[in-house]
Image (cartoon, rainbow, N blue to C red):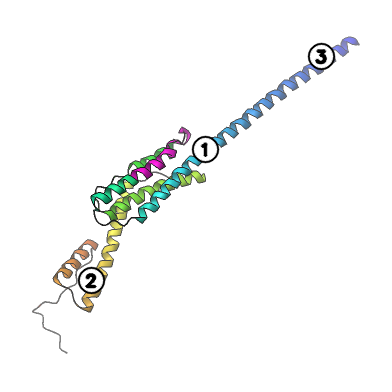
Amino acid sequence: MNEFLDKLWSMEFGAALIGAVAGGAFSILGAWWQSSVSNKAAALAQAQANAQRGFDALKRLEGHLEAQTFEGMGTGSTRATWNRELRGMIKEAEGPIMLLPDTHKDTRSHALTLLNEIKIWYGLPAWPEYRIEVGLLVAEAVKVLGLFVRGSKTPAKRDMTEVIRQTIDFNKRQDARKELEALNHEAVQSGLSEDGMERARELRDLLGIPHPVSPSPDEPEAAS
């Protein structure tokens, strides 16, 4: 009887011991998993906070860009002032973006590449085109960082050289249409000077619009 009780006690003790060990292992595993999840969440939150700082800096640059009223090639003084401000605001954005960890290197690389494409203004292209170029690059970087902060998928990289070219071409054509409409209105109201007619021809060539057919000097007038 005693031998049986000893065996039973040994079995119960062994089972309890195994249960205790297993329970401890699961507790340790659970604590490790919770810690891992917590660390990842904290790292993501820190990365998103840095991206937000870069995003905010670029939004300030966007606003500053839109506020400028330079004309043509500007002057040496205005270009120097703009370039100094531009460099400072880009550095302000680059700092926190560089802090994005390697787990988010695609976002970091994408945003920094866009900022590296922003050129110093030396007068050419003229301000209207230069502003479009800088504005598109900044807007694209803002989109990349904004989507990351929001937890959305990072957008695919675009050929910004082509995007800029197409946008500038579109704007030029829009401006040409408006100018040609104004010249056509002037022609109806009071007629055009030689310079005005030449400009209208240039605009039609740019837009691919056929030139109006002028009546031949030898063509007899229709009978009234």
Q: Residues within 10 Å of mark 3 (few under 14, many from 20)?
A: few
Mark 1 or 2: in front is 1
Q: Amino acid at mark 2?
A: Leu
Residue 6, x across and y down, in percent? 85, 12
Query: Which is nearer the eye, 107 or 206?
Result: 107
Q: Is residue 100 above or below residue 2?
A: below
- Ranked by sequence position, the earlier of labels 1 and 3 is 3
Dominant secondary structure of the magenta stretch? helix
Q: Give the residue at mark 1.
A: 46
Specify start and end residues of the magenta stretch as a single range.
86-104
Can residue 159 be seen from the camera position used here? no
Mark 1–mark 2 Cα distance, whole angstroms, equals 58 Å
Q: Is residue 188 left or right of residue 115?
A: left
Mark 3 or 2: in front is 2
Mark 1–mark 3 Cα distance, whole angstroms, equals 53 Å
Mark 3–mark 2 Cα distance, whole angstroms, equals 106 Å
Q: Amino acid at mark 1?
A: Gln
The image quadrant of residue 93 is top left
Residue at 90% x, 10% y is 2
Q: Give the residue at mark 2.
A: 183
Residue at 32% x, 55% y is 167
Residue 49, x across and y down, in percent? 50, 41
Q: Give the residue at mark 3.
A: 10
Q: Is residue 48 left or right of residue 185?
A: right
- Ranked by sequence position, the earlier of labels 3 and 2 is 3
